[in-house]
Amino acid sequence: MLDLIDLSRGRSDMGTDEFLAHGYEVLGWMAAYLAGNEEHPLVPQAPPGAVIRALPTNPPLEPEPFTAILDDFRTLVVPHSTHWTSPRFMGYFGLGPCAVSLLGWMLAEVLNPPRMLHSTSPVATELEVVTLDWLRQLVGLPHPLFGMLHTNSRVDLALIAALEALGIGSSTRGLAGRGLPRLRYYASTESHLSVEKAGIVAGLGREGLRKIAVDEAFRMDAEALERAIREDIEGGWLPVAVVATVGTTSTTSIDPVPRIADICERRGLWLHVDAAFAGLYAIDPHMRWILEGCDRADSLTTNPHKPLFMPFNCSVFWTRKPELLKSALSVSSAYLHQSHRGEDGPPDLNDYSDKLPHKFPALPLWMVLRYFGQQGIIAIHREHRRLAQLAAQWIGESTAFELLAPPTQLPVLCFRAHPQGMDEEAQLRALNERLLHSVLAEGRYFLSDTELKGRYTLRIAIGNIRTIERDVVGVWEELQARLPAALDACQGDREGGNR
Ligand code: PLP
């Protein structure tokens, strides 16, 4: 086989001059894209499968010029992207990376240091330790708090530590075949799906999660939690943990953490707070209230890739009990010698995680914190919250739209079109689905949807660093302008159905 390959056609890495020339071109494209000079529909217009069909099925055998690859990026990758980076993208949490985070990632990737053991690249660990302590101070959580960066919100790590805290030997002997009681953890019906996935990964299973009802403002009902725990104990279950959410995905409601902490302390349960979206709004001292009671949590997750303008994947896991993670997850090997720097030395972060190696997100995060500073971040968050309040006011005053969840001071709104005289849930659902699809098909704005107490709901989320008032005015005008056609189409559907 080997002699069929013509090795004279091999190539080494790009030379410095070529790298510079292409690098300027790439950066130029990125700058134009961020400035909005690259206008694209926010949602791909081609049918699903278009990229797969456009690409050769066989892998490249011969070297190709970088310009050809870049051309395909422009003509194939960009038009088939959903443009989350656009200021007019207001779906989910309206995320979007800032320029500094992108530059920081480029530098992190060129160093490519594995954050694994301290010794595999000391700066990867030490910058993370310092940056997460800055972040802790910025949101007002008490010292000491062990922090670590992960790609995503790691509720599974909280469950692993909670099991370790029980002292049932879960990390050494496993959970099966030992006559243990069935294990239970609790989260509200509005908790994120990652909470359920975490139980599957940590061995508690889907049935291990008991979902607790919410009140009229979509916050966990603490009394219902108390009742559920009591019932479970009477039924022979072993309660392990409670996951409270600060900023639920649909409405950004905030569970009553102080009351939940009381219950956890009384029952000896691990309290994990999922503050993936909302936690970092506490950087603004006026928003500190959202983390009330979180100083009593055993662990807490929050995502700089949401309101801190970092690209995916950058999530903080904080815990007051890192020794439990370490006793559950530390594994030694002959080829990776753990450092022995004593209690006060920088940790081998690999001991506190199931993954190795990890990239270097601490570098862009450190740069973002320095570039904006607390004041800069607060200014952007306040503007986003002002824009959301403005939109809430327009919706509240409109006769054709209504809010479906009380605004929470976080920049997300849940609403729907509700024209006078149309009160059937099925009709309202059909109308709002049509309205959303017509906005998405036009491609100028991106909104997302959810379901609240059985009602189909539209969401506007303002979180992109480049979103300004003009964009929010624009999406509101677009919704109003498209409503009559959506109504006509629904009317047509009904008449067609009646014939
Ligand atoms: N928790 C909440 C409340 C969320 O809204 C999300 C995502 O939107 C997550 C957890 C999961 O976040 P990720 O997987 O991006 O870390």
Image (cartoon, grey):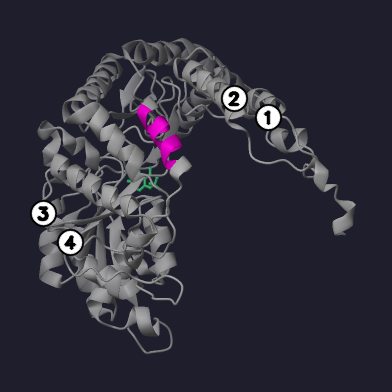
Q: Quadrant of the N terminus?
A: bottom right
Q: Which mark's residue is nearer the viewer, 2 or 4?
A: 2
| Cα separation between marks 1 and 2 | 8 Å
Q: Amino acid at mark 2?
A: His
Compared with 446, 301 (above or below) is below
Task: Assess whether residue 326 is covered by the magenta stretch.
Answer: no
Q: Can you say whether 388 is above or below 61 in the image?
A: above
Name the foreground residue: 164 vs 430. Answer: 164
Q: Is residue 359 visible?
A: yes
| 149 on left or right of 66 | left
Say which of 431 and 200 sits in front: 200
Q: Nearer the viewer, mark 4 or mark 1?
A: 1
Q: Could you tell me if the residues under marks 1 and 3 are in contact, i.e. CB atoms within 8 Å? A: no
Residue 370, position in %: x, y? 24, 32
Query: Mark 4 or mark 3, which is nearer the start of the sequence?
Result: 3
Quadrant of residue 261 in the image? bottom left
Q: Which residue lies at the image location 44% right of the left edge and 44% below the top edge? A: 111
